[in-house]
């Protein structure tokens, strides 16, 4: 046991019966004593300088052992902190999922918007070409008629040059003539206006004459080919 009670004016020893070691009022009057028992209004519960409960006050320099209540309080505070962290993590996770969903939705909307605009742009382009083609194709027909007839060779040569240039322009726009003469009749490409009776089976259902050329823009029919079709008797 620490001899903190053996002071100049104190005769306390292990056999002391004054009671200061049992929490009773101490008669020590040595000012160097730091147990606090000689201060007014305080009681000493010293036990070798270390005790579980102390009423010595704020100036007490005794060592305190943590109690079960102290451990429980610390555990409760830790548990509350974990609960708060879990709640914050759940909130952040939910916000991340929401933001991800919004990002995916916006991306899909943007892709649909681009695709829609792309289709509109392509359709507008096709419509413009078809409009020009509807005006140029009849001119090609007129040149073909002029070239198939008689007349001055120099004039025909001039027509041929103009026709060739116009034909190239039309082809550069993606407009091409529909093959018809000698081809098997196809209602998706040809429009039959007459039939040719024949005993030649090789001509049955075959285009034997073209009255007017057909044209298509890529895979779209601009004008069906007007034809004659062979038919076996």
Image: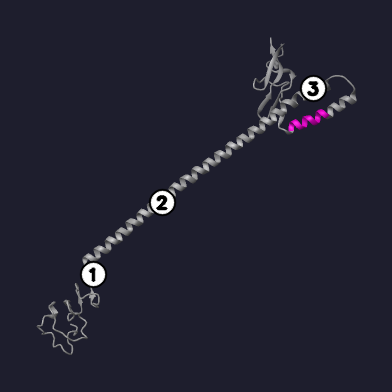
Q: Position of residue 134 (x, y in %)?
A: 72, 25
Query: Quadrant of residue 142 in the image?
Result: top right
- Asked if the residues shown at circle 2 and circle 1 are in contact, with their CB atoms under 8 angstroms apart, the answer is no
How far apart, in angstroms, are the residues tagged by discs 3 and 1? 112 Å
Numbered badge on residue 66: 1
- Asked if the residues shown at circle 3 and circle 1 are in contact, with their CB atoms under 8 angstroms apart, the answer is no
Residue drawn at x 60%, y 35% as measured from the top left = 119
Q: Give the quadrant of the C terminus.
A: top right
How far apart, in angstroms, are the residues tagged by discs 2 and 1? 39 Å
Q: Crowding near pointer 1: few (<14 within 10 Å), some, many (20+)?
A: few
Label 3: which secondary element = helix
Numbered badge on residue 93: 2
Residue drawn at x 14%, y 80% as measured from the top left = 21
Magenta stretch: includes residue 169 = yes
| Residues drawn in magenta | 162-171
Residue drawn at x 72%, y 28% as measured from the top left = 133
Residue hosting label 3: 142
Q: Position of residue 179 (x, y in %)?
A: 71, 24
Q: Give the quadrant of the N terminus.
A: bottom left
């Amino acid at each position: 046991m620490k001899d903190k009670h053996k002071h100049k004016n104190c005769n306390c020893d292990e056999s002391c019966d004054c009671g200061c070691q049992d929490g009773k009022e101490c008669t020590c009057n040595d000012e160097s004593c730091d147990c606090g028992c000689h201060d007014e209004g305080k009681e000493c519960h010293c036990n070798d300088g270390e005790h579980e409960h102390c009423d010595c006050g704020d100036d007490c320099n005794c060592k305190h052992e943590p109690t079960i209540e102290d451990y429980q309080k610390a555990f409760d505070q830790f548990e509350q902190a974990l609960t708060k962290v879990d709640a914050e993590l759940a909130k952040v996770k939910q916000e991340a999922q929401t933001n991800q969903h919004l990002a995916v939705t916006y991306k899909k909307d943007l892709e649909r918007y681009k695709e829609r605009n792309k289709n509109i742009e392509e359709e507008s382009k096709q419509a413009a070409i078809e409009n020009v083609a509807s005006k140029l194709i009849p001119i090609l027909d007129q040149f073909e008629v002029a070239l198939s007839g008689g007349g001055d060779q120099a004039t025909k040569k001039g027509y041929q040059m103009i026709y060739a240039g116009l034909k190239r322009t039309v082809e550069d726009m993606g407009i091409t003539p529909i093959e018809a003469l000698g081809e098997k009749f196809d209602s998706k490409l040809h429009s039959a206006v007459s039939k040719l009776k024949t005993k030649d089976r090789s001509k049955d259902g075959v285009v034997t004459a073209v009255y007017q050329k057909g044209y298509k823009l890529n895979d779209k029919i601009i004008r069906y080919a007007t034809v004659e079709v062979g038919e076996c008797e």
